Amino acid sequence: MIINKITPQGYCSGVKNALSIAYEVLASASYPRPIYLLGSIIHNQHVIEDLEKKGAILVEEKGTSRSDLIDKIEKGTVIFSAHGVAPIVYEKAKKKGLTIVDTTCGNVLLVQKRMKEYLSLGYTCSYIGTKGHPECEGVLGISSDILLLESITDLDKIPNTSKLYVSNQTTLSLFETEQIYKELQKRFPNAILDNKICKATTIRQQACLDQEKVDLCLVVGDKASSNTKKLALASKSIGISTILIENAKDLEQIDFTNIKSISITSGASTPEYIVEEIIEKLKRVD
């Protein structure tokens, strides 16, 4: 079986920074205990489980906002995830007297900063994102005036204005987002369109689109990871059979009959050792 490892792989800089901070906090006696993760610091269950083994307490509940989750923490240290949080979360944490450790990705912080700037200048502000995603939640929490755009059909919701600013979630599909921006340019030629898909996301998606023709593409990552799911979509878009898996055990559910060539890529929050375990197991497939 031919195995093509698509590059780049491994953690992006934002994930590396967040995890470095989290492990440093857990190893230090200077941070008040308990130490909480306000939602998954990154979207990878293997990493979360390792942090929990080292003493972190995950506070997460499907469908519950970070603003509501912070209400469950009464003392100690709280680690904000790489996805960022809304201003109200900071306010609540400070009011409770919690020690705050912020691991928000620099790219996300830039989106939040620019959104605030254009709101203060009187612009109508819109944000292309996925409802319920923590990064999206953090940006929308800046102001109720920010309009969420989830698809090109949502552009009809934008009021007629001469001052429009639009930015986006950093982990979206490069090409789906590009279509939305092209349509925005047609409808609002004077709008400030600030595409903030991060470099790591862009490069990985392009590498998927440029991959050699294979019988199967495996995308490794957590099913909750936005950038991982977009990699799978990119691979499928060029007609390659694609499966998203989380670890080597998932290979047991795949029928490798007639599969002679495989490509493998991974999300920006997927540990490299998981990919290597999968490759080693693939080498033993009959």
Image (cartoon, helix red, strand yellow):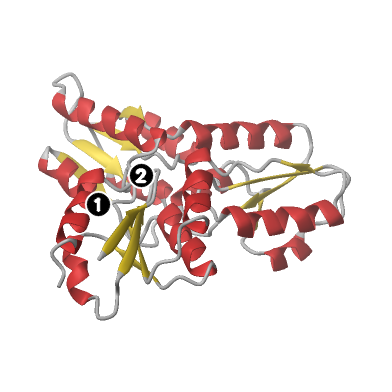
State whether residue 221 appears in this view: no
Q: Which x, y percent locates residue 183?
A: 78, 58
Q: Which x, y percent locates residue 153?
A: 71, 68
> In the shown orientation, is residue 54 left or right of residue 132?
left
Q: Is residue 21 above or below residue 4?
A: above
Circle 1 sits in a helix, a strand or a loop, which is it? Answer: helix
* Residue matched to label 1: 275
Q: Which quadrant holds residue 74?
A: top left
Asked whether the beta carbons under mark 1 and mark 2 sit within 8 Å of each other, the answer is yes
State whether residue 200 appears in this view: yes
Q: Residue at x 26, y 32 (%)?
A: 22
Q: Which x, y percent locates residue 192?
A: 78, 40
Q: Which quadrant holds residue 4?
A: bottom left
Image disc number at residue 9:
2
Q: Which x, y percent locates residue 26?
A: 17, 30
Cα distance between the residues tagged 1 and 2:
9 Å
